[in-house]
Every structure is written in structure tokens, then in C-alpha cells.
Image (cartoon, rainbow, N blue to C red):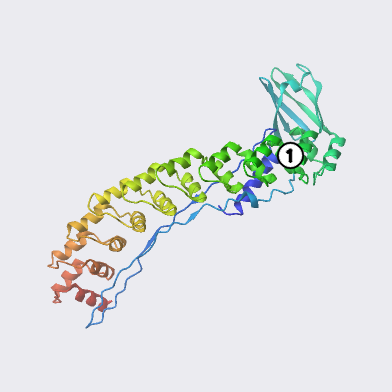
């Protein structure tokens, strides 16, 4: 995921939680932090076209060396919450008056605030304690209100059983609005008063933030912190866990992911101490905890890089997967190769298929190339049965890339050509020399005990 995408996602999250009032938010709005590592291994087996030029007297057999790019490109992005700019101007509709629709459930009342205009549609849900509304009009139209530090909402309408509807108007408390502005909160707009009301912002909360070092806080960040209930105990707990210089947006991200000092300390105990705040957020978003890390440590796979762990979790790589590779002889495999194996579905069973036919110790990158080109144990065994032993992996790849099969070799054997060198087969196939072609040349009087002569003849006519 690119750096440009992640800040955009995070800002959208803050719009949903921080502004509340603007786009179908709720008083208990949540910040959704999305960390989706993108793992797209690119495994390309390329066999360059072979056009062997064979002089009449000194034939040259083309040497096929396929270029195998088996290095997976793993893009998990640079998930850096610290670089995200959350100080954006949140624009939205005027929600100070409109329609309301309510539903009572138990000791809660959910109120949906809607626009009262056909030209400007918006809505916002909020949950309140039923105890805040002692005088709801039942059965007939009436007026009731709710007052908080930021102002008062006056409702007109009625309830039938547990359902209610009507109109409302919000009246801001100018004295509270002035207090917020005079407390060092910056960029406070008129529409923020309704936001302050919805998150039940109080003077004491503003004072608490100032006491903890957050004095020059933007109005929308104040709303987001109040909405996420970033309180003093949370701030001090995160700071005591090693993040003394934690920023506002990092606090919001951590609270949205329910990151606690205990979680941070668990990571530290597993060797991930003093890691950047954005990596803690990434770990939590991927549900990487001490138990997950310990599983790898227990099989001897320790000190895994942070972003590799994120990739492991995103691809469902487990300690059992790595142990299966270890048991097949692939020990101390680099993290990026583990990711490549998993992305290509190379597991212990796939490797065992080759060892069962006596084809063992295949290099890692060759295994990736094998899987990308659908090389199977049966494909290799076919050549082994033809008498080709100890075939190098790059020769296997060349044979597969040119679709050379044992039946192709058998056709030449029937014409009397035995013990054909393995590295001569790609030159024959790429030149278009087939058993049928050789047979036709023999019928025309061109007979030779060397297949190289037929390559020369074929290229001469071409």
C-alpha cells in the first residue's frame, strides 16, 4: 500500500470518528484503521528465443540459460502513522436543526438526526442514556430537551410505544464555545459546537488535555479524542509504556485499535521493544500478539523483521508452515523466501514429491521457478526414466519452458538417435527440429548420425 493511500484512509477514518456530526456518524463513532499489507510476489520464468546460428563447418549448439526472476516483490507499504497529517479542515453540513427519529431499546435511546431539506441530505445516529430524557411525550406531541456543556437540543414531536419522531433545533452555549477557544484550542468553527455536544465535551476534558501537554489542539482533533474517549489514564499509560512523545493522531490510532500498555509490554517481552508507534498500530491491526510471535520463536525462527511479521500474518504463514519446510531440509530460510514459498503454495508436500523420486536439495529460487512453471515430480521423473540422471534445475526449467517432453526424445530414439545430450534438446526444439522433420530429411537422402546436422539444415532452409 502506498504512502499516499494510507494517509487518505486514515483521514477518512478520522472523518468518521472525529467529526461525528458530518457523515452518518454516531456518538460512539469508531476510527477504523486499515492496514492491508499487499503481497504480490512476481515470479517470472523467461526463456529467451533461441535462434542458433550454425556455420556449415563448425556447428554451434545454442546454450539455453533461462532467466529466472524468482525474487518476490513484496509491497507491504510503509505504514507510518507518524507521517499522517490529520490536521485537515473537515467540511460538512449545518446540522443545528432538522428532523429526528428515535428508537428506545432497554436503557438506551438511539436518535437519528436527518436533514430537513431536499437539497442537502445528511443523517447522523447517536446513542444516549434513556435516563437523560425523563419527560418524553407519549401519545401526543410535545417538547423535550437535552442540555450539555456545549448547548441544548430542543426536540418537538411524540413517541408511540418505543418509536418517536419530530423536529429539533440545537442552540449552542456561546460561553462554552468561547471557553474552548480561549483554552488554546485552534481552528474552532461555528459548526463544531454541535460536534462538542454530540461527544459530550466538558471543560474538565479540555483542562485534562492541556495539563497533559496538549494545548494547541485543533478543534476537530479535540472532537476525535473525546469521541474515542482518550482519557488521562490512557494517555499516561501509553506514555509509561515508552511513548513519552506520543502525538495526538498516534493516540487516536492506538485508542481506535484498543492498544493498551499491557499489549505494548507483551511485544517488548518478545523482543519488539521501543518500536515506532505506527508499527504497534500495524501489529494490532493484523492481530499480531505475543502468542503469535512466540510460535515462531519456539521453532527457532527468531528476530523476524517487523514488516516480515506483518506479511506473514497477512498471508496466514504459521510456525507449522515454516517447520514443515525445515523438516524438508529448508532451514534458516530468509523471510522474503518464506513469503515467496507461501505465495506460490510451495509447502512440505510439494517438496516431498520431488524428494520421493530422488530429486532433492532443489535451490529455493529454483523451487519457486518450478512452481511458477508447473514443473511436477512426474515431469522430472519422465526424463529420469529416459536415462537422464542428476539433471540441473536450470535444465529442467529450460525443458519445461520449451514444452519438451520425454515423448519428444523417444521419437528421436526410434530413429536411432540415443544418448542425446540434455543441453542439445532445447536447441533442437527451438530450431523446430522434430523426429518427423528428421525422418522426412532422411527420406530425401539427407542422412547423418548427428542431430546437429539437422539443426544446420533446418536453419539453412529458414
Where 413 sits versus 53, above or below? above
Where residue 255 appears, as percent x and y from the top left, is: 64, 38
Asked if residue 95 shows in the view, the reply is no
Which residue is the site of mark 1? Answer: 223
From the viewer's perspective, is 453 left or right of 214?
left
Q: Please, which residue is most extreme toward the bottom here?
A: 57
Q: Quadrant of residue 169?
A: top right
From the viewer's perspective, is 197 left or right of 252?
right
Q: Nearer the viewer, residue 296 or 130?
A: 296
Q: How many marks can you see?
A: 1
Where 345 sits versus 28, above or below? below
Where residue 39 appears, as percent x and y from the top left, is: 48, 51
Residue in the image at 77% along x and 40% along y: 211
Q: Please, which residue is most extreme toward the right here?
A: 175
Q: Secondary structure at mark 1?
A: helix
Asked if residue 328 shows in the view, the reply is yes
Packing grade of label 1 (10 A; few <14, some 14-19, many >=20) is: many
Where 28 sits versus 161, above or below? below
Where residue 411 appears, as percent x and y from the top left, is: 17, 63
Q: Nearer the viewer, residue 391 or 242?
A: 242
Residue in the image at 72% along x and 23% along y: 164
Q: Quadrant of residue 21?
A: top right
From the viewer's perspective, is 442 left or right of 35?
left
Which quadrant does the C terminus fall into?
bottom left
Q: Nearer the viewer, residue 363 or 432?
A: 363
Where residue 266 appears, as percent x and y from the top left, is: 54, 39
Amino acid at each position: 500500500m502506498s504512502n499516499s493511500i494510507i494517509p487518505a484512509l486514515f483521514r477518512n477514518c478520522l472523518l468518521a470518528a472525529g467529526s461525528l456530526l458530518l457523515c452518518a456518524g454516531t456518538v460512539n463513532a469508531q476510527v477504523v484503521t486499515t492496514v492491508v499489507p499487499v503481497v504480490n510476489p512476481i515470479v517470472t520464468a523467461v526463456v529467451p528465443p533461441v535462434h542458433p546460428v550454425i556455420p556449415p563447418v563448425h556447428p554451434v549448439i545454442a546454450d539455453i540459460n533461462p532467466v529466472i526472476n524468482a525474487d518476490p516483490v513484496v509491497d507491504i507499504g510503509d505504514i507510518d502513522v507518524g507521517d499522517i497529517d490529520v490536521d485537515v479542515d473537515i467540511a460538512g453540513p449545518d446540522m443545528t436543526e432538522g428532523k429526528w427519529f428515535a428508537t428506545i431499546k432497554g436503557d438506551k435511546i438511539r436518535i437519528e438526526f436527518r436533514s430537513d431539506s431536499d437539497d442537502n441530505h445528511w443523517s447522523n445516529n447517536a446513542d444516549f442514556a434513556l435516563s437523560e430524557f425523563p419527560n418524553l411525550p407519549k401519545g401526543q406531541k410535545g417538547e423535550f430537551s437535552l442540555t450539555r456543556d456545549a448547548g441544548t437540543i430542543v426536540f418537538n414531536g411524540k413517541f408511540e410505544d418505543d418509536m418517536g419522531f419530530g423536529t429539533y433545533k440545537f442552540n449552542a452555549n456561546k460561553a462554552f464555545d468561547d471557553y474552548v477557544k480561549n483554552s488554546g484550542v485552534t481552528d474552532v468553527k461555528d459548526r463544531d459546537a454541535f460536534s462538542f455536544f454530540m461527544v459530550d465535551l466538558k471543560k474538565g476534558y479540555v483542562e485534562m488535555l492541556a495539563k497533559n501537554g496538549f494545548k494547541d489542539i485543533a478543534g476537530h482533533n479535540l472532537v476525535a479524542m473525546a469521541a474515542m474517549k482518550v482519557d488521562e489514564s490512557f494517555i499516561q499509560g501509553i506514555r509509561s509504556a515508552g511513548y513519552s512523545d506520543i502525538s495526538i493522531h498516534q493516540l487516536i490510532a492506538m485508542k481506535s485499535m484498543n492498544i493498551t500498555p499491557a499489549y505494548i509490554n507483551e511485544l517488548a517481552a518478545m523482543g519488539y521493544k521501543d518500536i515506532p508507534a505506527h508499527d504497534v498500530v500495524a501489529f494490532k491491526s493484523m492481530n499480531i500478539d505475543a502468542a503469535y510471535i512466540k510460535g515462531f520463536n519456539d521453532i527457532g525462527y527468531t528476530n523476524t523483521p517487523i514488516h516480515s511479521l506483518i506479511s506473514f500474518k497477512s498471508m496466514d504463514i504459521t510456525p507449522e508452515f515454516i517447520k514443515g519446510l525445515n523438516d524438508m531440509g529448508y532451514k534458516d530460510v530468509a523471510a522474503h523466501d518464506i513469503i515467496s514459498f507461501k505465495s506460490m503454495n510451495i509447502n512440505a508436500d510439494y517438496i516431498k514429491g520431488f524428494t520421493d523420486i530422488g530429486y532433492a536439495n532443489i535451490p529455493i529460487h529454483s523451487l519457486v521457478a518450478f512452481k511458477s512453471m508447473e514443473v511436477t515430480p512426474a515431469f522430472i521423473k519422465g526424463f529420469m526414466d529416459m536415462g537422464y540422471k542428476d539433471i540441473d534445475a536450470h535444465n529442467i526449467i529450460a525443458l519445461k519452458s520449451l514444452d519438451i517432453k520425454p515423448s519428444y526424445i523417444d521419437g528421436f530414439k526410434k530413429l536411432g538417435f540415443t544418448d542425446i545430450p540434455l543441453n542439445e534438446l532445447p536447441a533442437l526444439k527451438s530450431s523446430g527440429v522434430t523426429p518427423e522433420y528428421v525422418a522426412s530429411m532422411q527420406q530425401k537422402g539427407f542422412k547423418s548420425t548427428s542431430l546437429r546436422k539437422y539443426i544446420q539444415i533446418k536453419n539453412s532452409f529458414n
